[in-house]
Amino acid sequence: MDEPLEQGLSEFFEEPSQRYEFDVVMRGYDRHPVNELFNRIQKTFDGTADELERVTPDVIRATEFNVVIRGYHRRQVHEALLDCIRRLQAPA
């Protein structure tokens, strides 16, 4: 049976911080800046970001993270960011 429409939509509109989880690996992206960016992305999707916090696809593309010991898995972060770019570019 098909799932109710509301259930499917609520899954799509989950905030990024709840939607994405990253493994911690020996050499990965510094967790603090990654968390800060995803918090800004969440506020952008929620509509609670002020002008300076608002994130655009170009902001995401321009972001670089340092590689550190015990950081987030780089490929997982890249895939999540690509998903956020797609969601930001999707017609409203």
Image: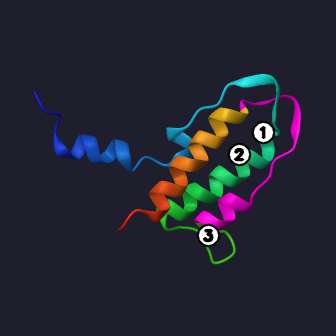
Q: Which mark is residue 67?
A: none
Q: Residue furthest bottom?
A: 51
In this view of the protein, which residue sits in the foreground, 78 or 10? Answer: 78
Q: Which residue is mark 2?
A: 35
Q: Residue at x 40, y 62 (%)?
A: 90
Q: Secondary structure at mark 2?
A: helix
Q: Secondary structure at mark 1?
A: helix
* Disc 1: CA contacts within 10 A as few (<14), some (14-19) or many (>=20): some
Q: Residue at x 66, y 39 (%)?
A: 77
Point out the tag, 2 or 3, that comes first from the N-terminus: 2
The percent coordinates of residue 5 (x first, y second) are 18, 45
Q: Which residue is mark 1?
A: 31
The quarter of the rendered structure image containing the C terminus is bottom left
Extent of the magenta region: 57-73
Dividing the picture into quadrants, the one containing residue 79 is: top right
Disc 2 from disc 3: Cα separation: 15 Å
Q: What's the residue type where badge 2 is placed?
A: Asn
The percent coordinates of residue 85 (x first, y second) are 54, 57
Task: Relative to 69, say whether 85 is above or below.
Answer: below
* Cβ atoms under marks 2 and 3 closer than 8 Å: no
Q: What's the residue type where badge 3 is placed?
A: Arg
* Cβ atoms under marks 1 and 2 closer than 8 Å: yes
Task: Relative to 13, say whether 89 is above or below.
Answer: below
Look at the image and name its color scheme.
Answer: rainbow
The percent coordinates of residue 14 (x first, y second) are 43, 46
The percent coordinates of residue 63 (x first, y second) are 75, 57
Q: Which residue is mark 3?
A: 54
In this view of the protein, which residue sits in the foreground, 35 or 86? Answer: 86
